[in-house]
Amino acid sequence: MVDRANRPSALNAPSAAAPGAQVDITGSGASSKVTATLPSGESVEVLLYGATVTSWKSNGGKTENLWLSEKAALDGSKAVRGGVPVVFPVFGPPPKSGHATSALPQHGFARTSRWEFLGKSTSEDALDSSSVKLDFGLYSSGLTEEARKAWPLDFGLVYSVTLSKDSLQTVVNVRNEGETSFEFQFLLHTYLKIKDISKVAINGLLGVEYVDKVLNATTHSQKDESVTITGEVDRVYSKIPQDTTTVVEDGAPRFDVVRDNLQDTVVWNPWTEKAAAMGDFSPDAGFKEMVCVEVGAVNGWQKLEKGEVFEGGQTIKSLL
């Protein structure tokens, strides 16, 4: 377990549903989604399948900030390609044997489980109309029989999504509700929407070590101030000292991705061949209009003893 506090510092984000924000639940079954809209027009959509954020619009609702594949499955048939899928309790392919997650599929079960909408939070310290907070829950009792058999541990997840005028905060709270300890990994697989990948630079990772999965999982150090993408990129940056990673497009800051109680970030773009090989990635050239900057705890394992809680997440700021 990483030697640090389980609970994050405050992100100064409002923690209550704001008067005037409109929240609607539409669809049925696996296609059910929760949509929240601020009086000023900003909005967020969260599919209950996977608690996947599929849309986040800022700038009065005019600017979509998340990339979603045209062939993304939104009916619960498979994990959503795009938006912000929640990865838990294992990142990537699980260990082949000898670990509690070994029987799980890649990226675990959170992104392919139906979550419960817990509603809007209210408190006395956020009486304004500039933000709305939505809570979603997933518990061991709500897993499919297959997932429960593969990972027979007692846990509770609460996922909080806070929409503000210029930002989206997503935080996961993990609680060990069983008698025995367990280990897990966690990642927010965020697909950011950009205009032209050839004009994108990612700053804030200088000097950070990373595992390059394109180069046989070898370890390197980020020597350039900016990460630029000219081919397939799949890197896991670990133990990042500063909290903010900035996505710059055409010389201007586009997004700030602010991590909280998380020290790892994955940078991913499938590029031409891999994008074409994925049946749910569309259009094939869509890789030119997206980049994944994924915050998480994936370097090793987080361990929770009975009754312990881990909390971590991100705030993405739209800088247009």
Image (spheres, rainbow, N blue to C red):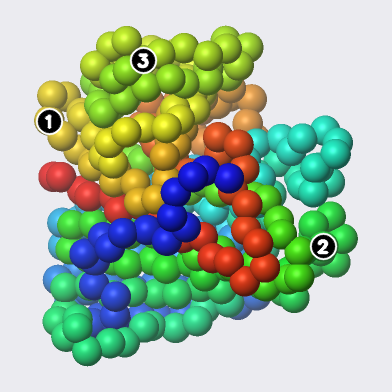
Going 84% across and 55% down the picture, which residue do you hit? 150
* Residue 96, horizontal then vertical, whole percent: 82, 33
- The quarter holding residue 62 reads bottom left
Residue with the mark numbered 3: 222
* Residue 299, horizontal then vertical, whole percent: 55, 35
Q: Distance between the residues labelled 1 and 3?
A: 21 Å
Residue with the mark numbered 2: 152
Q: Which of 146 and 79 is in front in this view?
A: 146
Which mark is first along the chain, 3 or 1?
Answer: 3
Classify residue 262 as left or right of residue 131: right
Q: In this view, does 10 lie above or below 254?
A: below
Which mark is first along the chain, 3 or 2?
Answer: 2
Q: Which of marks 1 and 2 is in front?
A: 2
Residue with the mark numbered 1: 252
* Residues tagged 1 and 3 counted as in contact (Cβ below 8 A): no
Q: What kind of residue is marked 2?
A: Pro
Classify residue 48 as left or right of residue 128: right
Q: In this view, does 181 lie above or below 208?
A: below
Mark 1 surroundings: few (<14), some (14-19) or many (≥20) residues within 10 A: few
* Residues tagged 1 and 2 counted as in contact (Cβ below 8 A): no
Task: Tell me, yes or no, if residue 3 can be seen here.
Answer: yes
Classify residue 86 as left or right of residue 154: left
Going 84% across and 46% down the picture, which residue do you hit? 103
Going 64% across and 25% down the picture, which residue do you hit? 277
